[in-house]
Amino acid sequence: MPATRSRLARYGLSLIAVGAVVILRSYALPQWSLGHPYVLFYPAVILAGWLGGFGPGVFATVLSAFALAYLWFPPLYSFRIGRQQDAVALLLFMAINFVISLLTEALLRAKHRNAELQRQLEERSRK
């Protein structure tokens, strides 16, 4: 993660990304099938991980899971998940997003290592 982004900003972005999906899903696309309510949450988690790293990606995953359980899985407006297939789908969603967060963090670390190596090479070539 870039040092220019504070922890609060990175986790705040996760909250904003998931909140935007909840608003979009609730008000702009309410007629969209409840059979796959989690589809729009994948980009929010990817964005949070890409811009914030592993922790914010996992935070977005957890926020998304709570929103899904409460707002779209029956019984609605309860954190209890009534159907086994919804529980399995939610666990799979969380597992996939956890892996996405891990891979995004690895990519960010490699990008930062590459930038540091480039900087070192430029310094050596100037000497």
Image (spheres, grey):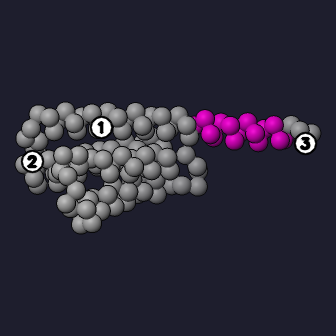
Q: Quadrant of the C terminus?
A: top right
Where is residue 24 drawn, in percent x and y?
30, 62
Where is residue 126 drawn, in percent x and y?
90, 42
Q: Residue at x 21, y 61 (%)?
A: 30
How far is mark 1 from mark 3, CA to CA?
48 Å
Is 59 in the magenta?
Answer: no
113 on left or right of 38: right
Mark in the foreground, 1 or 3? 1
Is 112 in the magenta?
Answer: yes
Q: Residue at x 27, y 66 (%)?
A: 28
Which amino acid does the dot numbered 3 rest on?
Answer: Arg
Nearer to me, 18 or 125: 18
* Residue identifier under label 2: 74
Can residue 66 be seen from the camera position used here?
Answer: no
Residue segment shown in magenta: 109-123
Which amino acid does the dot numbered 2 rest on?
Answer: Pro
Which amino acid does the dot numbered 1 rest on?
Answer: Met
**Labels 2 and 3: the sequence-earlier one:** 2
**Marks 2 and 3 close (CB-CB < 8 Å):** no
**Labels 1 and 3: the sequence-earlier one:** 1
Residue that extends furthest to the bottom in the rendered view of this protein: 27
4 on left or right of 80: right
* Residue identifier under label 1: 94
Number of numbered discs overlaid on the protein picture: 3
* Residue identifier under label 3: 126
59 on left or right of 47: left
Secondary structure, mark 2, is loop
